[in-house]
Amino acid sequence: MIKIDDISLLELAKSNKDKAFNYLIVEYSKKVFNTCVNILRNKEDAEDVTQEVFTAVYLSIDTFEGKSKLSTWIYSIALNKSKEFLRNKTRKKRFGILTTIEREDSHFMPDQVINFDHPGVLLENKERAEVFFQALDQLAENQKTAYTLHKIEGVSYIEIAEIMETSVSSVESLMFRAKKKLKEVLTDYFERNER
Amino acid sequence: MERKEHWIDQTLATEKFIQSVEPSNELMMRLKNIPNTISESYDKIPKKVVWAVAASIAILVCMNFISLKEYKQSSSSSIETTELLDSHFSYLKQL
């Protein structure tokens, strides 16, 4: 498939929206789906959110001003839609001590761990991956976002800074704190379970 | 101690074993169908209804505007009456 740069694609969106949209589906559907899967850790949920992301993209592609890269814009929509989906799902199933998803210090079991069905995790790694994701959920939301994007998706610090509307040094700081917190959580888990 | 460190490193390395997943054909079909579903949902609202709602809003705005104008007029005339009465009573007091 021929690569089209952002400016040409935005021009195309103004003259032939459907054609530009089809190009975006081919180019970005895998990235968006994987971002959603890594946040939601459930195939069906990720598919629903991916559809929502592309619906939002279709509705606003012709008014997108191109101030940021298209990939950055689409990533931001995917992140926001996934977080929104999780918030709504958590709100619906909230009971007892299984409360807020934003709390940094809580030892709750979020919904995406209960319904863990990550299609990118092989069966032999599933148990360890569940522990890893459970630890990841103990991080503050912005640390979790930065860590997921960089370590799992392979997004660069510069692009993460653009997606999260912050500076590169802030992303570096988020990553440092995320790694530190992850080690603490895993140490605690190991000591409690004495593996 | 070493065992713990090893386990933590192994768990953190899980991120390397998470594979990229191809979206299913069904999802691709759903995505490609988005332009049709959006235009269908727009077509579901009859144009008559859209015009009726627009006309109702316009009438409501006009009615509010007229009533506001009348209220202003009535309040300014009542001020004039009060001023007239005040001057009349102060004249009577002087007498």
Image (cartoon, rainbow, N blue to C red):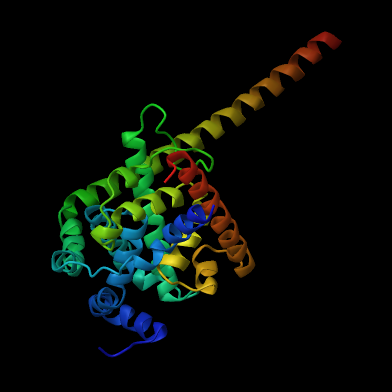
- Choose top left, top right, bottom left or bottom right for residue B47: bottom left
Relative height, residue A13 to residue B74 (above, below): below
Where does the image place residue A17, in percent across and percent down from the top left?
27, 76
In the image as oriented, which residue stretches furthest toward the bottom? A2
Above/below status of B81 relative to B51: above
Return the x and y of residue A47 as percentages of the image width and height: 24, 59
The answer to whether residue A142 of the structure is visible from this angle is: no
Picture residue at 35% right of the left edge, 59% below the top = A38
Determine the residue positioned at 15% across, 54% down.
Answer: B44
Between B51 and B85, the one lying in front of the other is: B51
- Image quadrant in which you'd find residue A173: bottom right
In the rendered image, residue A108, in percent from the top left (x then y), is placed at 43, 37
Viewer-closest of A54 and B8 = B8
Q: Quadrant of the N terminus of chain A?
A: bottom left
Q: Residue at x 34, y 66 (%)?
A: B17
Give A45 or B79, whichever is nearer the viewer: A45
Instruction: Name, please, the residue furthest toward the front.
Output: B2
Residue A96 seen in render: yes
Q: In this view, does B5 lie to the left or right of A116?
A: right
Q: Please name whichever residue, A177 or A21, is drawn nearer the observer in this view of the structure.
A: A177
Number of numbered labels in the structure image:
0
Residue A143 location (% of width, % of height) = 53, 56
